[in-house]
């Protein structure tokens, strides 16, 4: 019940600053608050990670800022949303060893890659631990930008969070930017997290 | 949760359906869930184009039209401001600051984000195709690269085959 009282309190201050007739609006808002609370659904958020520092920073940012939006609230018995961590492998392995005499070399490369991925996800899950967020992980093979957009479509997430490598204009044109591509093609809103500036005081 | 310093969310709006949609998405994401203890402060910035940028190059007789164009732009700007206020109060979110600044939207949004020390900058995206993007320029692209804070780009879901408002 306390939450409803707070909502009215906030509503009052908002009403007095904008319009007069605060009493009516406050009462109306209480009705909408009680009606809206149970139907409000928690969000499904997807965070794309690779080995770069920026994507981990993006994950931390997402967990910190969006925690209340995703996490479950035991008091109101509301089901939590979902946080999906997606990592895309480039599929370069196939091209290097078209016909192997022995299978041992691609095998060891594959194992190394799996180890890498496991380490990656362990780090990522560390960050999500204890935040009461249902987390799932996804590993996809292929071209990072296309696969991420495809994953967004398939899982119908509400928000995609990516880090930004901070490439300059030229590198961006030559190497291609995953965040650029996703900003243009993803079917859901995309949040591009930039790392804080190292030199000046960081505002985050 | 650190609620000591409230973080600022800056939303850029022009007079398009895309930006109102972006504003609503931003509200849903950053404000509505926190009714009881607001974590963010909202700043809405409307970049008003200058009359000269709208008219293109000056030709004969444009001098007379300029005041009328200015008036029209002013009207649009106050309409946008009012509409934003309506959208926000419908979700019972308080706007900390609503600004209308004249000039190039890219620089305005960049400076606005710096000035308010924004944590997130939210923009709508017109959803231009690749070609239009090159010629018309994309504000959201520019800001995604140059802003110092996180940028959220919200696209309005396109209805199938009703692309009459693609501009």
Image: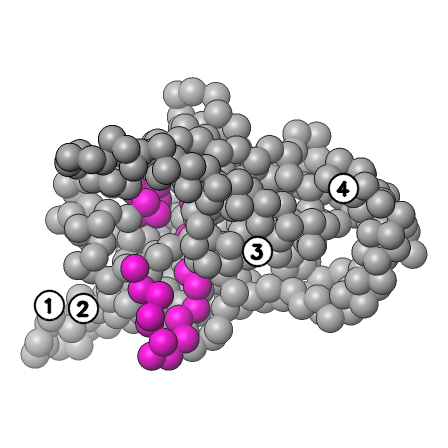
Identify residue for label 4: A19
* Residue at image location 17% in from the left, 66% down from the top: A92
Q: CA distance from mark 4 to mark 1?
A: 68 Å
Residue indicated by mark 3: B24
- Tags 4 and 1 both on a single chain: yes
Q: Is residue A75 above or below residue B146?
A: below
Where is residue B167? Give x, y as percent: 30, 59
Mark earlier in primary sequence (4, 1): 4
The answer to whether B31 appears left or right of B115 in the picture is right
Horizontally, residue B32 falls left or right of residue B131, namely right
Q: Label 3 crowding class (10 Å Cα cut-off): few <14, some 14-19, many 20+?
A: many
The label nearer to you, 3 versus 4, is 4
Q: Say which residue appears at 29% left-offset and 37% top-offset.
A: B65
**Residue B15 part of the magenta-drawn span:** no
Expressed as whole percent of the image width and height from the top left, the position of residue B108 reads 39, 32
User: Which residue is found at the position 33% from the left and 72% from the top?
Assistant: B163
Q: Earlier in the sequence, mark 4 or mark 2?
A: 4
The reply to whether dot 4 and dot 2 touch (C-beta < 8 Å) is no
For label 1, the residue is A96
Q: Pinpoint the chain carrying mark 3.
A: B
Q: Is residue B153 magenta?
A: yes
- Secondary structure of the residue carrying tag 1 is helix
Q: Name the residue that disc number 2 marks.
A: A93
């Amino acid at each position: 019940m306390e939450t409803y009282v707070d909502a009215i309190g906030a509503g009052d201050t908002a009403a007095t600053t904008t319009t007069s007739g605060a009493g009516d609006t406050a009462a109306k808002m209480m009705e909408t608050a009680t009606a809206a609370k149970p139907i409000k659904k928690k969000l499904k958020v997807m965070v794309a990670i690779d080995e770069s520092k920026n994507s981990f920073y993006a994950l931390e940012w997402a967990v910190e800022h969006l925690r209340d939006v995703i996490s479950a609230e035991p008091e109101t018995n509301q089901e939590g949303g979902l946080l999906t961590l997606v990592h895309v492998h480039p599929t370069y392995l196939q091209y290097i060893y078209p016909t192997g005499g022995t299978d041992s070399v691609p095998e060891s490369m594959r194992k190394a890659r799996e180890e890498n991925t496991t380490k990656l996800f362990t780090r990522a899950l560390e960050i999500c631990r204890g935040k009461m967020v249902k987390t799932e992980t996804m590993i996809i093979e292929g071209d990072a930008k296309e696969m991420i957009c495809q994953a967004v479509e398939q899982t119908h997430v509400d928000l995609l969070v990516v880090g930004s490598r901070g490439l300059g204009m030229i590198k961006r044109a030559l190497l291609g930017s995953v965040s650029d591509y996703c900003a243009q093609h993803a079917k859901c809103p995309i949040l591009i997290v930039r790392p804080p500036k190292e030199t000046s005081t960081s505002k985050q | 949760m650190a609620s000591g310093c409230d973080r600022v969310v800056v939303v850029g709006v022009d007079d398009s359906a895309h930006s109102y949609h972006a504003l609503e998405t931003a509200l849903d994401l950053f404000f509505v869930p926190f009714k009881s203890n607001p974590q963010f402060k909202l700043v809405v910035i409307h970049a008003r184009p200058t009359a000269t940028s709208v008219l293109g190059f000056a030709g004969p007789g444009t001098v007379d039209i300029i005041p009328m164009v200015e008036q029209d732009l002013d009207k649009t700007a106050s309409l946008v401001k009012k509409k934003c206020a309506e959208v926000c109060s419908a979700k019972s979110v308080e706007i900390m600051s609503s600004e209308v600044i004249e000039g190039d939207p890219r620089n305005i949004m960049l400076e606005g984000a710096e000035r308010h020390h924004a944590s997130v900058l939210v923009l709508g995206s017109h959803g231009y195709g690749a070609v239009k993007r090159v010629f018309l320029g994309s504000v959201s692209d520019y800001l995604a690269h140059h802003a110092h804070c996180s940028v959220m780009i919200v696209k309005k879901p396109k209805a199938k085959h009703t692309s009459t408002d693609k501009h």
